[in-house]
Image (cartoon, rainbow, N blue to C red):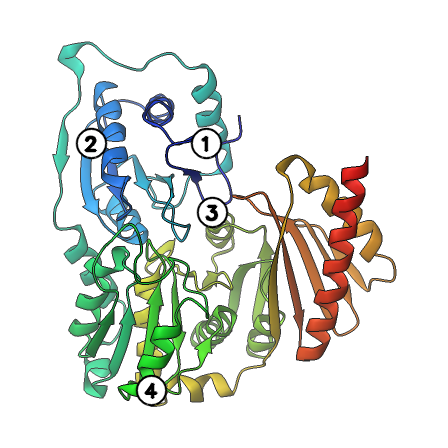
Amino acid sequence: MRLFGTNGIREVVGPKLTPEFTTRLANAIAGTIPVGGPVVVGWDGRTSSRALSSIVSSTLALAGHHVIEVGLLPTPAIQYMVVRLAAQLGVVITASHNPPEFNGFKCIHSDGLEIPRSDEEEIERRFDHAPSTAVPYRSVGEIGVHASGAREYVQGVLARVDGARISARTYTVVLDVGNGTAAVTSPDLLRKLGCRVVTLNGHVDGTFPGRPSEPTEANVADLRRAVPSVGADLGIAHDGDADRAVFVERSGRYVPGEEILALLARDAVRRHGGGIVVTPVTAPDSVEEAVQPLGGEVVYTRVGSPNVTREMLARHAVIGGEENGGLIFPEFQLARDGAMTVAVVLDLMAREGQPLDALLAGLPRHTLLKEKVPCPLDRREEAVRAFAERFGPGAERVVTIDGVKIYRAGGWVLLRPSGTEPLLRLFTDAKDPQRARDLADEALAAVHASIGAERKR
């Protein structure tokens, strides 16, 4: 049974994500690690997270494991604590940016990275077939609490940037927490960096009353209005588990995640005198154009932060990340990290003495369009193959790292199955906005025709 998608397990609470499902999953996880070393358990602010964490912690303890609950924290903070507490494994209860009816699980290796696919497959095998891992009463593990994770994580981020230089600028920042776990870390981080902070949706609420958890341009409309209205230097928004950060310029313009990726990749390559940048195939060509003149090389992976982080580890990359605002800074930790992204952007602004819009002005600009096409789970792979046959003839180049990426004159189109939903995801990149739109429209027509052809078979 395939449980894990591109970034952990995500299911709707109730229909599939039940107490029985959670117990079986925790039992399967318990059987993959030796009894002895501690296991860290942390969670996000969703309505079901605390209850699910209790099931996970109890099942692990009944299997003989010593559990350390670090509580409600951003996912990157939990990953940080797995390493800091010398745990052999971490379990994060989160559904990241998904709607409030979802929840899910991520497993973190002792090195702080999300577990590799081989470990996921072992958990999936045990989920279906493993007996109970419960031990005799004398061997039941303890459940302890470590309550200072937020403070330790913020201190770790602060140590990686020049706080005095940032503080001297006394930036005004509007922070849209999005009712997520960033509420327990990002306001404190920004104030310790000397910023004047205006918060939106600043309390944790698993129903996400302020805005949807995904920090898209449409979803952060209040932030875009607030930044110029208060004369702020910068706007910041996080997703539900704060492993991502997106930005708004002082004018109120929403900055697409790929622009921040290109900006910080260029800066990292410049500071290191070259180096590897790792990103999924969904990243636009502007990232290559930003780093290659400085001796940088871009290495592409399948979608999903586990793929990016493990390739970064293997290649000794100077930076990595995704076009959705999930940036990874290996000098701190190999994890998508929203708070670290915020600190690095502020550090760059302070070092260069320029606002974000001026820093972005010197970048190569592309238009990256993203579309979702509903498609039944059992038809997605065939639909992608059919699309390649329809759209591929005459292509300049075809890449099949993840789905199919077809290069045409002036741009490219990527179609891949979603790792978490019954969808196909379509990405289109071109320097010219109209060329991007034309390619996307042509590709969408081919996708719908491919799905229709599959339904008739």
Instruction: For the residues labelled 4 and 2, say whether their Cβ atoms are less than 8 Å apart.
Output: no
**Front residue (pair 358, 46):** 46
Total labels: the figure holds 4
The image shows residue 421 at horizontal and vertical percentages of 54, 44
- Which amino acid does the dot numbered 2 rest on? Val
Residue 159 appears anywhere in the view: no
Which disc number belongs to residue 306? 3
The image shows residue 147 at horizontal and vertical percentages of 12, 46
**Which numbered disc, 4 or 2, marks the residue that appears first in the sequence?**
2
- Which amino acid does the dot numbered 3 rest on? Pro
**Which numbered disc, 4 or 3, marks the residue that appears first in the sequence?**
4
**Which numbered disc, 1 or 3, marks the residue that appears first in the sequence?**
1
- Disc 1 element: helix
Q: In which quarter of the view is residue 279 placed?
A: bottom right
- Disc 3 element: helix
Q: How far apart are marks 2 and 1 (CA)?
A: 20 Å
Residue marked by disc 1 = 119
Residue marked by disc 2 = 67
Residue at image point 19% right, 81% down: 167
